[in-house]
Image (cartoon, rainbow, N blue to C red):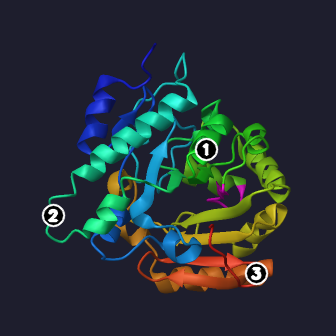
Amino acid sequence: MTNSIRESTKKILDKHGYHLAGTHGAVKTCLWLNKSMRNNGACYKSQFYGMASHRCIQMTPTLACNHRCLHCWRAVELETDIPQVWDSPGTIVDSCLIEHRRLVSGFGGSENMDKTKWKEAFAPRHVAISLAGEPMLYPYLPELIDEFHKKGMTTFVVTNGTNPEMISKINPTQLYISLNAPDKETYEKACAPVGDTWENIKMSLGLLKNSKTRTAIRITLTKGVNMKAAGGYSDLIRIAEPDYVELKAYMHLGFSRKRLSRECMPSYGEVLDFSEKVAKSLGYCIADSSETSRVVLLSKNGAKSNIL
């Protein structure tokens, strides 16, 4: 089998805490899993949707991506080829669980660790398919989601919306489309797409409207880049009629620091102000917010519900 991840790329991924899952996927523990096991806070997804942060896997079936987003904290500049042969969903799921547990085991020696939560972390209940890359490039994504569901786990899939054909094939617990521009010109600046995919995104938004699963639009707001034209965002969101809209500040972290300055990171107040404008234009209401994560949640009636 041809390995799609070059040795030079693997060294960088290893340095930043990524563990390979199969030959082209990856898994990595997030900050909030660590904090949750220490009773020191939880991810905003826990607050918004009831996810247990210490029992969540952060993974991707492929590190390849057709966007080079300025705000992305991942190493989008790394060379990652499309595999000639894809790993099976079962192989990726099993490898993810093995590597996640290997990562979690390393936290056990800490004096500040909640031992009960640490043990629970070895039996994850949620999967965030959003670590890096574009998951819709993996041709067996529907089957991958089914494999996780068979193990009693919920799935959150985050896509850039450039592959509308796959949108209609998958049925995760919650489906996100990242919408990081109110118009095509801003999209090309903020996301640096490979190819002309703006119309594909609008097509995906239309498919989201008819999705049988919970749906969300996710917007990463970057000052000086895409934090403008609230009405433009509203017009696009209206196509999808999602259950939720998340508006989150760009955070000056990871590899994004090589592309953007700290001044591009909006404050919580600025995110809240912009969210209110989008909500008013869209006819949605603010359902919740997290000042720590600088994120605001909108829903149609201001309500929210847990995934379980």
Quick one: label 2 or label 1, which is nearer the N terminus? 2
The residue carrying mark 3 is 284
Q: Are marks 3 and 1 in contact (CB under 8 Å)?
A: no
Disc 2 or disc 3, which is closer to the eye? 2
Residue 4: give x, y in percent of width and height: 44, 23
Question: What's the amino acid at mark 1?
Answer: Lys
Viewer-proximal residue among 238 and 52: 52
The residue carrying mark 1 is 150
Q: Is residue 198 above or below residue 115?
A: above
Secondary structure type for disc 3 = loop
Q: Is residue 306 left or right of residue 72?
A: right
Indicate yes or no whether the magenta region holds residue 175. yes
Q: For the point 50% across and 57% down, which residue is it?
A: 125
Point out the residue furthest to the top here.
1
Viewer-proximal residue among 277 and 117: 117
Q: Is residue 154 above or below residue 22?
A: below
Mark 2–mark 3 distance (CA, rounded to whole Å): 44 Å
Residue 126: give x, y in percent of width and height: 51, 56
Magenta region: 173-183
Disc 3 or disc 1, which is closer to the eye? 1
Disc 2 or disc 1, which is closer to the eye? 1
Q: Is residue 304 visible?
A: yes
Categorize mark 3 by other alpha carbons within 10 Å: few (<14), some (14-19), many (20+). Answer: many
